[in-house]
Image (cartoon, rainbow, N blue to C red):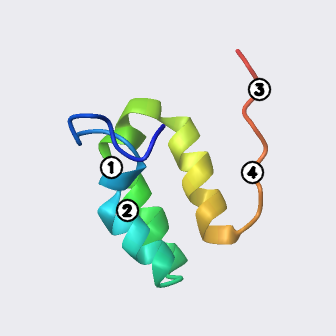
Amino acid sequence: MGWLSPDGAHGLGTFTHALAAIRAHDWAAAEKALLDSDWAREVGHRAARLARQMLTGQRAPAEEPA
C-alpha cells in the first residue's frame, strides 16, 4: 500500500483519523479508526487482526489458509 495513489484516493495517507490517533498514542482510537475504514470492509478478518494488534501492541498470529 503506498502513501497515496496518484489520484490521492487510496493509500496509507488516506487513513487520517487512524494516523492522528497513532501520533497521539491513542491506541483505542487507532483501532476504531482502522475498523471504521473502507479498507477494513474490503479485507475483513485481516483488518480485525491488525487493528487488535494496534490496540494491544502484541503481534497477532496470521490466519491459517483455508
Residue of label 3: 64
Tag 4 residue: 60
Task: Looking at the image, tell me whether mark 4 or mark 2 is earlier in sequence order.
Answer: 2
Residue type at tag 4: Ala
Determine the secondary structure under disc 4.
Answer: loop
* Residue shown at the point (32%, 67%) measured from the top left: 17
Q: Amino acid at mark 2?
A: Ala
Residue 54 location, quadrant: bottom right
Question: In which image quadrant can residue 33 be found?
Answer: bottom left
Would you place residue 42 above or below residue 12 in this image?
above
Element on which disc 1 rests:
loop
Quick one: label 3, few (<14), some, or many (20+) residues within 10 Å? few
Specify the label residue 37 is tagged with. 1
Residue beneath disc 2: 33
Observer able to see residue 11: yes
Mark 2 surroundings: few (<14), some (14-19) or many (≥20) residues within 10 A: some
Residue kind at label 1, given as amino acid type: Ser
